[in-house]
Image: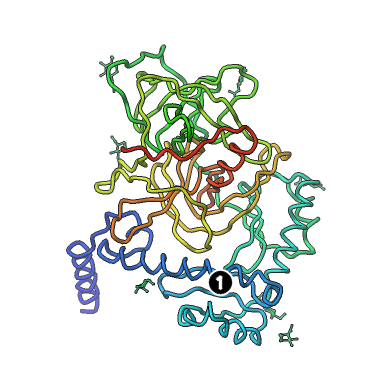
Amino acid sequence: MRVIYILLILLSILQSHSIYAQRYHPLANLWKVDDTEVPEYLEFEKNLTAIDEILRPILEQDDFISSFGGTSINIFENHIVVNTVNYSKVDDLLALPQITPHKAFLFFKKTNNSMSLLKHNFYKISSIAQIIHPKRVLIYIDMEYNNVVLYFLGHNINNTEFIDAVKSFNPTIIYEGSSPPSQNIIRPQRDYDYDNSIKIKALGGDGLYNNANNMACSLGFWATNKYHPEELYIITAGHCHNNTDPQNNFYLLPWNSTLSNLTFLGSMVFDFIEIYDFGIIHVVGEDVSPSSVIRNDDADQYKELPISDGAPVSSHGVHICKSGYTSRFTCGYVLGLNEIYATEDGFTVTWELIITTLYGGYGDSGGSVFSFVSPQDLNLVVVHGIIITVGLASCSAQSIDTIFKEVNEKIFYDLILYLGNS
Ligand SMILES: *[C@@H]1O[C@H](CO)[C@@H](O)[C@H](O)[C@H]1NC(C)=O
Ligand SMILES: *[C@@H]1O[C@H](CO)[C@@H](O)[C@H](O)[C@H]1NC(C)=O
Ligand SMILES: *[C@@H]1O[C@H](CO)[C@@H](O)[C@H](O)[C@H]1NC(C)=O
Ligand SMILES: *[C@@H]1O[C@H](CO)[C@@H](O)[C@H](O)[C@H]1NC(C)=O
Ligand SMILES: *[C@@H]1O[C@H](CO)[C@@H](O)[C@H](O)[C@H]1NC(C)=O
Ligand SMILES: *[C@@H]1O[C@H](CO)[C@@H](O)[C@H](O)[C@H]1NC(C)=O
Ligand SMILES: *[C@@H]1O[C@H](CO)[C@@H](O)[C@H](O)[C@H]1NC(C)=O
């Protein structure tokens, strides 16, 4: 009798899901809500982000930095979690005229580590990383752990010396479960045919193929010169470049395509892989046209997502998505901002990264990283950067503001995000 009863409950649960649950939007899947609820949660996230924008600089001030330990957005509770070390400062904070109107959206959570301590520890640990050269580790301040996290991408590297050297700062140590999809090295079956017929649109998330190292990467976004809009560029990861090969010609590699119909794009004219990791392809291929759209073709709906703008990420805990050649379209959350990665070779440290819970595989490097922005138009996205490291739940991204700042300060390119009319 009991068995039948449980079966009936199960059946009714399954039924109610198949009848009512509509999860086409990527955020409905991430948040485990129905499509109809996405605009509401997106609005919560937008409003909380705006409040966090006011709150964060105040918490960085001398009066507060040793009493609070950072903030994180929780859309399900519709509040900002404010890590609190010394509760006697809460009233001072709430009394500020900028903060008082938003007090209902602040949740003060008891934590041990203040932001001044976390920043100090992060600074010390990154300095040691530059001396000891650990391999394949993301180093970031995590709001939930209220601590500096060392996230090792792989078990089989001996990082003992580094771990011992930073022990006194008590970081939280995480090892990634197992490795992501294997390296995307592709071997051409035959000579390339060039498809000269019509212009093909290259979208954010499309694959890129570099014949200097038989490797797939992904397209982050298009850029153009502010004063010469006919000049077009593709931004991708700098490590997609092969430094020993004089020619790094890039071809478009659309999703599910083979290497038989490659469309020529151009060569990589600059690659930054010392402190930052991004590269610029000057597009001269005549068969391809630029696009300000991100690809999500495998889905039934929301297949092409127009880019409305480019902006850095500023809050922890908000959603973030990516599109790339290998693992396609995935969404997750922001874990850390302005953080670092000690690379595979152990000598380069990449700065100003966004650490996320995104899933990604090797050929996703360079792919678009963005978030949805409008409760009124669930297609619209803002670009935040490009994928640099991949993992099962740990992709990191180089921030778009870093990319434009470096390009325009160091090589005077006057580049801006391409927002053409497509
Ligand atoms: C979000 O903020 C806007 C403008 O301040 C306000 O009108 C709206 O009610 C807020 N929405 C929610 C869900 O809090
Ligand atoms: C907490 O803040 C109050 C008010 O500024 C201060 O008097 C007190 O010493 C602080 N407590 C700790 C443990 O730092
Ligand atoms: C905070 O510190 C107290 C006292 O040292 C300790 O008992 C507690 O476990 C700590 N909490 C966290 C989250 O580390
Ligand atoms: C790891 O490296 C340390 C020195 O840095 C060494 O003492 C230790 O034996 C190594 N461990 C393994 C398993 O190789
Ligand atoms: C880079 O190019 C050099 C010279 O063409 C080649 O020998 C090497 O295998 C390439 N590297 C990779 C990773 O493919
Ligand atoms: C590849 O190119 C050939 C010859 O131009 C054409 O017939 C074929 O349809 C193309 N295939 C794809 C998938 O575009
Ligand atoms: C690409 O392949 C995947 C998996 O085989 C499939 O689900 C998807 O619909 C294909 N996408 C396109 C655009 O053909």
Compared with 266, 143 (above or below) is below
Label 1 sits on residue: 55
Please name the colour scheme applied to the rendered image: rainbow
**Label 1 crowd (10 A; few <14 / some 14-19 / many >=20):** many
Relative side of 138 to 78, left or right: right
Compared with 150, 217 (above or below) is above
Counting the numbered discs, the total is: 1
Relative side of 16 to 332, left or right: left
Q: Nearer the viewer, residue 391 or 279?
A: 279
| Quadrant assignment for the N terminus | bottom left
Q: Nearer the viewer, residue 404 or 342?
A: 404
Please name the residue shown 19% across and 73% down the image.
8
Quadrant of residue 262 within the rendered picture = top left
Compared with 302, 265 (above or below) is above
Residue 102 placement (x, y as % from top left) = 47, 79
The quarter of the image that holds ligand 1 is bottom left
| Residue found at the far top of this picture | 191
Which amino acid type corresponds to the residue marked 1 in the rendered image? Leu
Q: Nearer the viewer, residue 416 or 268?
A: 416
| Residue found at the far front of this picture | 227
Residue 175 placement (x, y as % from top left) = 62, 54
Q: Nearer the viewer, residue 162 or 383?
A: 383
Residue 100 placement (x, y as % from top left) = 51, 82
Please name the residue shown 39% across and 69% down the image.
44
Helix, strand or loop status at disc 1: helix
Compared with 208, 159 (above or below) is below
Residue 212 placement (x, y as % from top left) = 55, 20
| Quadrant assignment for the C terminus | top left
Please name the residue shown 65% across and 47% down the image.
351
